[in-house]
Image (tube, rainbow, N blue to C red):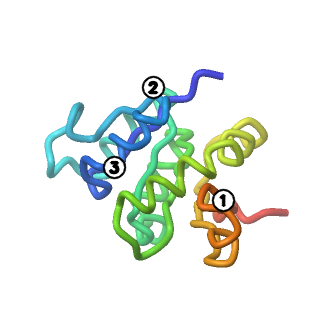
Amino acid sequence: MNLVYFTDRDLGKKFPEILRAAGLSVERHADHFQHDTQDEVWLREIGKNGWVAVTHDGRIRYKPNEKSAVVENNVALLVVVGHAPFPELATAFVATEPKIRNFIATHKPPYIAKVYRPSATAVALGPAAPGRIEQWYPPAK
């Protein structure tokens, strides 16, 4: 499966650079849209392209117009959870990517899923410990 991750502007430059360095296919918001492009607009385009949207905006799932854009455009949206420097979040995303890839393979868009960093205990056992991914929307049955 040829996955393309689209990183939202809120993830900056370093996050997508780390993903690319790990061999992932990444498209950045800044390479396709103006800085102030409304989320509904880029979500529509991501859905058309079949890319997987990655954001750090945890509020996006509570905004009716943006959630509607996810649903109406069959978007696979991953929300990176955590208050940490973007390089740390990106490193955790890369470590979790096999689980993310499995999740994507077994879930049909539209959906919103949260990607969590590994616990401190897991990182202490091994710095490349994966985090976890959980479906947020639609609610699991």
Q: Secondary structure at mark 1?
A: loop
Q: Residue at the spot x=32%, y=55% of the render?
A: 11
Tell which tag, 1 or 2, sits nearer the viewer: 1
Q: Secondary structure at mark 3?
A: loop
For the N terminus, which image quadrant?
top right
Instruction: Identify the residue position indicated by label 2 in the image.
Output: 49
In this rendering, position of residue 12 left or right of residue 69? left
Instruction: Identify the residue position indicated by label 1 in the image.
Output: 129
Query: Horizontal and vertical percent for residue 108?
Result: 71, 39
Query: Horizontal and vertical percent for residue 15?
Result: 35, 50
In this rendering, position of residue 64 left or right of residue 116? left
The CA distance from mark 1 to mark 2 is 31 Å
Q: Residue at the spot x=65%, y=46% of the render?
A: 100
On residue 8, the disc is 3
Q: Secondary structure at mark 2?
A: helix
112 and 12: which one is in front?
Answer: 12
Going from N to C along the chain, the mark reached first, 3 or 2, is 3
- Check whether the beta carbons of the residues at disc 1 and disc 2 lie within 8 A of each other: no
31 and 38: which one is in front?
Answer: 31
For the C terminus, which image quadrant?
bottom right
User: Looking at the picture, which amino acid does disc 2 mark?
Assistant: Asn
Tell which tag, 3 or 1, sits nearer the viewer: 1
Query: Horizontal and vertical percent for residue 131?
Result: 65, 62
